[in-house]
Image (spheres, grey):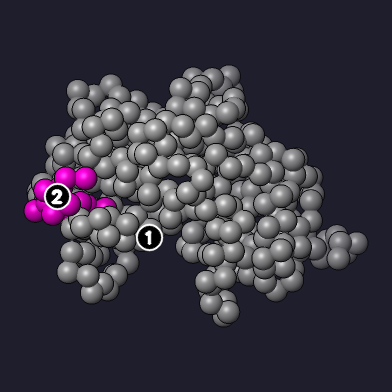
Amino acid sequence: MKLEQQHSEKPILVLGATGAMATYLVPELLSMGYTIKAVSLDHVISKNPRLTSIQGNTKDKAFMQSLLSEKYSAIVDFMIYGTAEEFQKVYASLLQSTDHYIFFSSYRIYAGNYPITETSPRLLEASDNKEYLAREDEYSLYKAREEDILQKSSYSNWTIVRPSITFSKRRFQLVTLEAPDFIERAKAGQPVFIPEAARTVQGTMTWAGDTAKMLAGLLFNPLAYRECFTLGTAEHHTWGEIAGYYQELIGLKPVFISTEDYLKILGSDKRTRYQLDYDRLFNRIIDNSKILRVTGLKQENFISLRDGLQKELSALPNEKIWQDSQRSRNMDQYLKDHPQIH
């Protein structure tokens, strides 16, 4: 990396700087010599003179106009734009304010074909479910539509990234369960319910520290502009095996139940069902050769899933850090309704 890039007077703007991936990306960029402006809803105290923490709501138009009145070497945008229409209103301002814009999509945009490459079919074009395709607020669809806005634009200073499921100290997943749904239950020895249909389905979970290295390797990389990249490890496991890692590391007691019972526990809204049917019940196996080739990283340098989970789970404090979610409370009720489960 060129010295003038490392010590650029123009900082990198990170939007959504306290999320699962950003928590690792910011220190990774600081270690490379960059100056960072980190924006989040939380106030973050830092002693690093090259890190400025800015507390604010990026959905506030005046706040964003103020931020984008400056010019940045790069903007790494972790924000969620809930519809393509919302992104349409802001994307030009973002691109005009930076030399390199990183847009976060998701590997959930892909249909069920595997191994996944950057040219794999997207659900937006591959699905024949008219009810599903009509939803403007469906994550896997609006991310694809927002990608299209960039790809059809006249701008060339963007890169689209499609991360796999990413875990860190701020986020753990099991099928469609998030940390508040199952981590404290597992530590307390309470059963955690998982759909039987997912037991033998392959999933890909990538440690956030490795995702940060991939992102850092794309910044200002001439091979990254006007390109899409799937960010993920090539390692994959069935959800049954992943549950086994949690069982080994924090005592999780997995109980496999029917899909319909599982969805009742989660809340049987369409969004929850679509996440299960159109992502977690697909075999998600990644061919990550493109991101490795462009960044020079190697698969063998990535931490294994089991070791990554151990690293992050062992760093959690002993005291409770997540309050019981509604889903966890629903599991308690399911247990009462099914006393034969122990």
Q: Quadrant of the C terminus?
A: bottom right
Q: In this view, does 277 lie to the left or right of 191?
A: left
Q: Where is residue 125 in the image (x, y as percent from the top left)?
A: 49, 20
Q: Which residue is drawn at 72% across and 62% down?
A: 247
The answer to whether residue 33 is above or below residue 203 is below
- Can residue 101 be seen here? no
Circle 1 packing at 10 Å, graded few (<14), some (14-19), many (20+), is: some
Q: Residue at x 71, y 63 (%)?
A: 248
Q: Position of residue 199 (x, y in %)?
A: 75, 44
In the drawing, what numbered circle is on residue 3? Answer: 2
Is residue 2 part of the magenta span, yes or no?
Answer: yes
The answer to whether residue 335 is above or below residue 264 is below
The answer to whether residue 75 is above or below residue 253 is above
User: Secondary structure under badge 2?
Assistant: helix
C-alpha distance separating marks 2 and 1: 25 Å
Where on the picture, by quarter, is residue 159?
top left
